[in-house]
Amino acid sequence: MPETESRKSDHIKIVLEKDVQHKNSAGFEDVLLVHNALPEIDFDDVDTETEFLGKKLTAPIMVSGMTGGTPEAEKINKNLARAAEEVGIGMGVGSQRAMIENGKLLSTYNVRDVAPGILLLGNIGAAQFAKGYGVEECRKAVEMIGADALAIHLNAAQELVQPEGDRNWAGILKAINRIVKELGYPVIAKETGAGISGEVAKKLEEAGVKAVDVSGSGGTSWTAVESFRNSPVGDTFNNWGIPTAVALRWCKKSVKIPVLASGGIYNGLDAAKAIALGAHACTIARPFLRAGVTGYEKIKEEMERIIRELKIAMFLTGSKNLKEFRSKKTIITGRTAEMIERLKLT
């Protein structure tokens, strides 16, 4: 099996079987939503619908780009997409480098046959731009799978601890700006578990990206994943990064484009807290991946559970819709409040 395909297979196995949780939390335990003992609304009237990149979503929830490029990924991505189509939420695929290197792997990413209507995001790693990738490869990533937009993932921490990882990150911002100008499709930037600071989000906004996904620390640690692949320094950097709640508040304060939240969002209450902190939507990975190996019905149940929990949180704050919910008071305590105070984000 070629190196890239083998690595993708390793990643699925490790995430499903090993403890790759960040040692530090995402910070959502410090976020308190104010309870309304007299909501004065009908739960059935609570509306979670939103719009992102020109497409309606039944809820501000998306499947984060996770996998592709290896045989087992085809079944997982089809299951994820089929469930997303039925529930009415969006989805991203994993890094498409393997597909671009080997066109025979297209089927492991191609989900339009089971999900013709979903918001679908392609995925390219930013580090590839220093190795010659450009507009042509990015256009392939979008058009070969019929995607609506492209996610450029930033995974410097993972690459640096990965034995075969990419070390050259010079000129990446300039390359992103060029892609945005020439691609002809919306581009978003996403981290992979180490977070995005306000300063970096501002640079990305100025480069023209349509949204940033903070993907902070607190969920899956990709440096920990690499430690199980014999990285000698992976475990040292297990807790590296900006906690999701802090990164979210920081980016929201720094940019006007939509900010997405991921990293340590495991249920609808986590999602509600992220939205209260300013997230336009939440992208979720590991809970859906774990369900994805069993079949699309289980994924659909997981998606519906998370959306129902989000609706309960909205109801319990007296919010009929997301606009009302975002206007409610949120209390931040503990370590998260301290970090926000030190960064002057209040």
Image (cartoon, grey):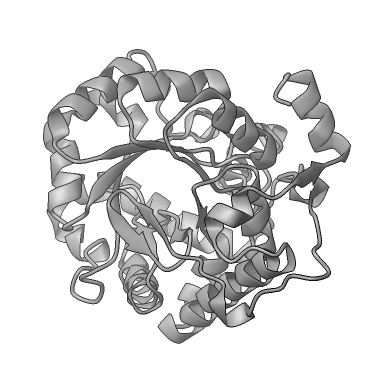
In which quadrant will I find the C terminus?
top right
Q: Reply above or below: 160 against 14.
A: above
- Residue 223's quadrant in the figure? top right
Name the one closer to the observer, 54 or 162: 54
In percent of width and height, residue 178 lies at 21, 21
Q: Reply above or below: 138 against 109.
A: above
- Residue 16's quadrant in the figure? bottom right
Q: Is residue 94 visible?
A: yes
Name the one closer to the observer, 225 or 328: 328
Residue at far right of view: 334
Taking the image as shown, residue 94 lies to the left or right of residue 255, namely left
The residue positioned 60% from the left and 39% from the top of the image is 216
In percent of width and height, residue 322 lies at 54, 57
Q: Is residue 232 visible?
A: no
In percent of width and height, residue 233 lies at 64, 31
Taking the image as shown, residue 282 lies to the left or right of residue 8, namely right
The residue positioned 35% from the left and 68% from the top of the image is 77
In which quadrant will I find the N terminus?
bottom left
The residue positioned 33% from the left and 31% from the top of the image is 209
Q: Reply above or below: 204 against 72.
A: above
Taking the image as shown, residue 185 lies to the left or right of residue 50, namely left
Residue at far front of view: 40
How many numbered marks are there?
A: 0
Taking the image as shown, residue 215 lies to the left or right of residue 135, namely right
In percent of width and height, residue 238 lies at 69, 38
Name the one closer to the observer, 231 or 127: 127
Name the one closer to the observer, 36 or 152: 36
